[in-house]
Amino acid sequence: MQIVRNTYLSLGSNLGNKLENLQKAIDLIAIEIGKISKISSVYKTSAWGFDSDDFYNICIEVSTNLNPENLLIQLNRIEKALGRIRTSDKEYKARTIDIDILLFESEIIFSKDLIVPHKEMLKRKFVMVPLVEIAPNVIHPIEKQRLQVCLSNIADNTEIENTNLKLVKPICLSDKYNYIAIEGNIGAGKTTLANLIAEDFNAKIILERFADNPFLPKYYADMERYAFPLEMSFLADRYQQLSDDLAQFDLFKNFIISDYYIFKSLIFAQVSLSKEEYALYRRMFDIMYKEISKPDLYIYLYQETPRLLENIKKRGREYEQNIAPDYLDNIHKGYASFIKTEESLNTLIIDVSDMDFLNNPSDYNEIISRIKNAT
């Protein structure tokens, strides 16, 4: 389990559309760093240490699974993406965005590239006023005093103005959803995506236990003979796993994500079973389906059949290598029919045929954005 820790950041801008720069930085931090819990008011102050346009300054509280060193690397990348050009020149200059790490939990860090708590924070009202607004009772690790007390002792007499301008706090998946189910055809990438989201958003993950099913290799060798015992064993296992895991509340996890939903059983059974077998199977399924919690969001990852075959070959499971394209096409049709008729589910279809969300961060971020904005 990854450890999630709190950090406090200071953001400032005095070039271009300053409010837009701050919002873009916040949005990127939510994607690249972690959940933004609090955002201060936007304060206007004169430039510190040089003549330039006034700054807009804010402080934010962020929960992140990054360590301080990697946090600094990611923040530098965000600054660069927003047009910040760093030079070896130590003089203060105007900038589109400036992001500083003020505090990282109660840690004290002195390294070549990073000093935490920020060595200048207790001298700067434009830092301390927005910081105290969102964290008045946090203890400064070196001063051993509440930040509110530290602010009252500050010697800086610079005027600072609350602009009353508003910034939008990015939506976090755990704020919007309690349970997300990801579905898709064989090789669509549902387990990969579920693992990525669980890691990035501290979710409890439920993964299908297909590898433990003794009928699966036999089924791909002789589908007609082993279809019914395979589908019945999958149904029983999925029902038990979802019933048990969805009933357990994990205090250390924000929400639940699974790489399957129990309706998957019915879709595959439609393709695999004879008419008589399916009729019996459907009776058992309907009894179990009534007892399973429905996800807040049902995601269907669509991949074109040729790409599915490539993925299946690449992952190298021996018993999958002879899967026919027609079989995958029938699974596609089964999901399409299910999505069309199951109106009670909040469904999001994402075509990932031309995406590589494992290796391409922009593809992954696009998927996360679509999930966050799903209605």
Image (cartoon, rainbow, N blue to C red):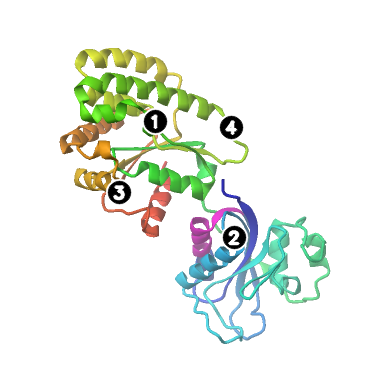
Question: Distance between the Cα atoms at labels 1 and 3?
Answer: 28 Å
Mark 4, residues whose alpha carbon is within 10 Å: few (<14), some, or many (≥20)? few
Mark 4 vs mark 2: which is more N-terminal?
A: 2
Mark 3 vs mark 4: which is more N-terminal?
A: 4
Q: Which residues are magenta?
A: 23-37
Q: Is residue 42 magenta?
A: no
Disc 2 marks which amino acid? Asn
Mark 1 vs mark 4: which is more N-terminal?
A: 1
Mark 1, residues whose alpha carbon is within 10 Å: few (<14), some, or many (≥20)? few
Q: Which residue is mark 3?
A: 352
**Which label number is shown at residue 51?**
none
- Quadrant (top left, top right, bottom left, bottom right) of the C terminus: top left
Q: Which residue is mark 2?
A: 67
**Which label number is shown at residue 249?**
4
Q: Is residue 25 magenta?
A: yes
Is residue 196 toward the left or the right of residue 307 in the image? right
For the question of whether residue 297 can be seen, the reply is yes
Disc 4 marks which amino acid? Phe
Mark 2, residues whose alpha carbon is within 10 Å: few (<14), some, or many (≥20)? few
Question: Distance between the Cα atoms at labels 2 and 3?
Answer: 31 Å
Question: Disc 1 or disc 4, which is closer to the eye?
Answer: 1
SS type, badge 1:
helix
Name the residue rendered at 28%, 27% in the picture: 267
